[in-house]
Amino acid sequence: MRATATAQPNIALIKYWGKRDTALNLPAVGSISITLSDLYTRMTVDFDDGLEQDVLHLNDEPNDKLLPRLSNALDIAAGGDRPKARIISECNFPIAAGLASSASSFAAIVVAASAAMGIERSVGELANLAGRASGSAARSLYGGFVELENSGDAVVVGELLSADDWPLDVVVAVTATGPKPVGSTEAMEISRKTSPFYDRWVSDQPDDLASARDAIASRNFSALASIAEHNCLKMHSVMWSSRPAIVYWNDATLACLQTIRQLQSDGVAVFFTIDAGPQVKAVCDPADTATVEAALSATDGVRDILTSGLGEGARLT
Ligand code: PMV
């Protein structure tokens, strides 16, 4: 009753922010993301009747902090009456700092837990289970360019283009490594209840999704850049206009945006996106990756640079 799965984080270009059903963790809006190749979470789930409690080892250290959410994901994937499990997780990038570690963790754990229990599930079923643990995790079941649509009691996730159809790179400028001040689940509810812009955010989303879908289908980089930056800044405007305000940015976040604006005016094919954390993700044409890495590394406050191409969805390993 043991299996190992690997999943990569995904970065939303058209963002998910807000829930329409908190019990089922269903998003209020659809979203479009790209799955990365070089950052990963590898998760082994070992169900063992002899254990009294779930145990988690993260990068070879015991970890009680992240255990409750992973235990909950095991309940979702294997039922509340499952045997207790030993979870061994290996993650090659900072956790809970806005780098979508929850997406790769929950995608990997539902794939591993289902296999360890001997339950055969379609990728769509696995995506829905991962999505119940963390909305964005549903997208990491797929590779390349991924769209998540809201549909009744479930989400429908599918690949718009594979990673090979339109290879892009993502250069992540790490501007802080600590955990975020407020988790996305709590922050989304604050926004839904208090931001005067929230309803408009939800009602505009189909237009943004359509624009991004068109840009991806025609591999139009500047059109994708324009809608992705707009959608990102709109999501952060909803956060900033919440009460209390939710501000994930730091000085270096803004400095990175200025660096990217300068690169754009120099003709470099690059755009930014930012999630629930202070890191800046610069999406670029691989021909420009070295230029983008050099410019972001030289930006004040940038502590580290991580670069990745686009990759495949979660799978057993
Ligand atoms: O899936 P969660 O609960 O980690 O929320 C993800 C929210 C954003 O990363 C900000 C946007 C997104 O679509 O991934």
Image: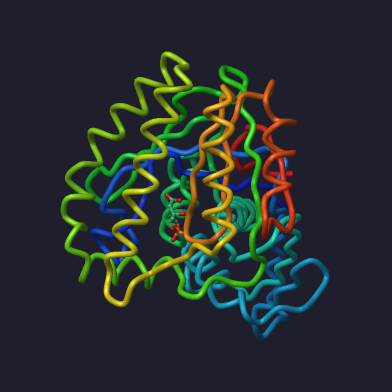
Look at 46% across and 74% down and name the residue there: 182
Name the quadrant of the C terminus: top right
Q: Position of residue 165 (x, y in %)?
A: 57, 17
Q: Is residue 100 above or below residue 317?
A: below
Determine whether 148 is above or below 63 in the image. Answer: above
Nearest the viewer among 187 and 143 is: 187
Q: Position of residue 197 (x, y in %)?
A: 20, 57
Quadrant of res 214: top left
**Viewer-proximal residue among 80 and 278:** 278
What residue is shown at x 59% (from left), y 32% (from top)?
Answer: 263
Q: Can you name the residue that lies furthest to the bottom here? A: 52
**Rendering coords of residue 68 (x, y %):** 55, 77
The residue at 28%/44% (across/down) is 150
Measured along the vertical axis of the image, is residue 207 above or below residue 181?
above
Q: 86 or 176: nearer the eye? A: 176
Ligand 1 in which quarter: bottom left
Left or right of 65 on screen, residue 225: left
Location of the N terminus (image quadrant):
bottom right
- Work out whether residue 197 or residue 108 is closer to the camera in this orientation and state it: 197
Furthest residue toward right? 60
- Percent x, y for residue 71? 56, 73
